[in-house]
Amino acid sequence: MNEEPDKATRIELLRADASDCTRCDLANGRTKVVFGTGNPNAPLVIIGEGPGENEDRTGEPFVGRAGILLDEVLRECKMLRKHVFITNVVRCRPTKMEAGRLQNRPPTTEEATACITNWLVPTLEAIQPLVILALGAPASSAVIHKGFKMTQERGTFHDSKYAPYAIASWHPAYILRLQGEAFDAARAALVADMELARLKVIEARKEPPKTLF
Ligand code: URA
């Protein structure tokens, strides 16, 4: 009998493969590969941009200030990390040297393409989520469409090659750079978009399955 491995096994095999990845230059500067965390059987996958300093050190996604905000928002939508799977466009921290210290930077197109092809797409194929929540433009461009415009296109559902439904929202790190009313509005939008994603999971579970892979 030739049984397909279950989702958790597929994710653990991918995680092990990715642990010594050298498919792009980010391998040279990383401390740990940040593959992803949460429930491989989750109907909702949340995708960020890439690890920062704390994630690089611990190997876990969203463990810095942005992660604290993400956890708050999950909790406000009555969810915990164990109810979702959280990953990123890239699995290794992109850095630049500025003012004498290593700073985060967005991934290059080459870095993002290598990681999307080798790890993000296989992760989504293994999990087969009903809904994807993309945080920020790089994740939205990766799973919804290239050149995604956050200001015009966030907060509504889009087609995706990787899930029946995908929605984009503000990245928590972006929200943390805002102040006053702008901060409050963007944070509220993230809570609203997370709640839309949660409600879409409930709705989609009642629909006949759409086979994507
Ligand atoms: N920002 C991200 O996009 N991902 C992380 O894992 C942490 C911060």
Image (spheres, rainbow, N blue to C red):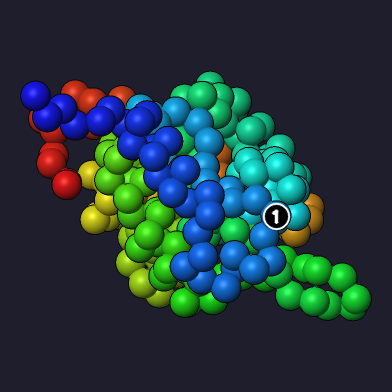
Q: Which residue corresponds to the image point at 80% horizontal and 76% vertical from the top-left?
A: 97
Does residue 210 appear anywhere in the picture? yes
What is the residue that sits farthest to the right in this orientation? 100
Depth order, front residue of 60/150:
60
- The part of the image, by quadrant, that contains residue 99 is bottom right
Does residue 77 appear anywhere in the picture? no
Residue 160 drawn at (x, y percent) = 27, 55
Q: Which residue corresponds to the image point at 15% horizontal and 27% vertical from the top-left?
A: 3
- Quadrant location of the N terminus in the rendered image: top left
Q: Is residue 57 left or right of residue 38?
A: right
Residue to which mark 1 is pinned: 31
Q: Amino acid at mark 1?
A: Thr
Residue 39 drawn at (x, y percent) = 44, 28
Residue 190 drawn at (x, y percent) = 55, 45
Residue 18 drawn at (x, y percent) = 47, 51
Depth order, front residue of 21/53:
21
Q: Is residue 211 left or right of residue 26?
A: left
